[in-house]
Image: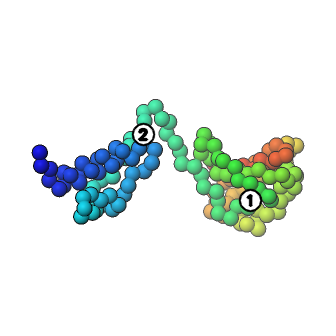
Amino acid sequence: MKLSHGTQLLMSLVLLVLGSGCDRPGPTPSTVATSSSATAVSASVPQTTSAPSASAPAVEPRETLPVGLPAPPEGVALPVSGEDPSLAARWSTPRDGQEVYGYYLDALPGAGFGVTGAYPGGTAAVITVDAPDGSPWAISLSGRDPLIVEVRRAD
């Protein structure tokens, strides 16, 4: 059976999408080519995307760290858990909790963040702030050696 050029192009695209795997984005229409003439697929061909699984929970978009928020002294970025979408950043630091707490109370106003609450504690402390855009955030400090600093959207 002889297939038209358009049918061959569509079949190539389907095979390419099926063979590309579900965990990676597929090629963009402008990068798919067929035959020796290397004809690019038109941008009018719709992209195929996999529908979310019925058993997969909906994932809320993660908060983005407010611009200008100071990182803790000697802070090392840690992975952010996918279970808490309000968590924007995590760091560990070898510095003492009282020192980092004082650092934030001094540095935040100069960075344009209004301190709305300061709650010191023994092994945990929280500072609440309004970012320059007015959004509320909480900076929590917990643990010792290392101290863990987390920044969350607070609304």
Q: Residues within 10 Å of mark 2 (few under 14, many from 20)?
A: few
Q: Quadrant of the N terminus?
A: top left
Q: How many marks?
A: 2
- Residue drawn at point x = 70 percent, y = 61 percent: 69
Q: Residues within 10 Å of mark 1 (few under 14, many from 20)?
A: some
Which residue occupies the foreground of this view, 81 or 21? Answer: 21
**Which structural element holds mark 2?**
loop
Amino acid type, mark 2: Pro
Label ID, residue 71: 1
Is 46 located above or below residue 38 in the figure? above
- Residue drawn at point x = 66 percent, y = 47 percent: 79
- Horizontal arrangement in the rendering, residue 79 relative to residue 19 (left or right): right
For the rendered model, the colour scheme is rainbow
Which residue occupies the foreground of this view, 9 or 114? Answer: 9
Q: Position of residue 99 (x, y in %)?
A: 87, 55
Q: Tell me, yes or no, if residue 64 can be seen here.
A: yes
Quarter of the image holding residue 115? bottom right
- Horizontal arrangement in the rendering, residue 46 relative to residue 7 (left or right): right
Is 148 located above or below residue 134 in the figure? above
- Farthest bottom residue in view: 110
Quarter of the image holding residue 9? bottom left
Q: Position of residue 5 (x, y in %)?
A: 17, 56
Q: Position of residue 19 (x, y in %)?
A: 36, 45
- Residue drawn at point x = 36 percent, y = 57 percent: 28
**Which structural element holds mark 1?**
loop
Q: Which residue is mark 2?
A: 52
Marks 1 and 2, the one that precedes in the sequence? 2
Amino acid type, mark 1: Ala
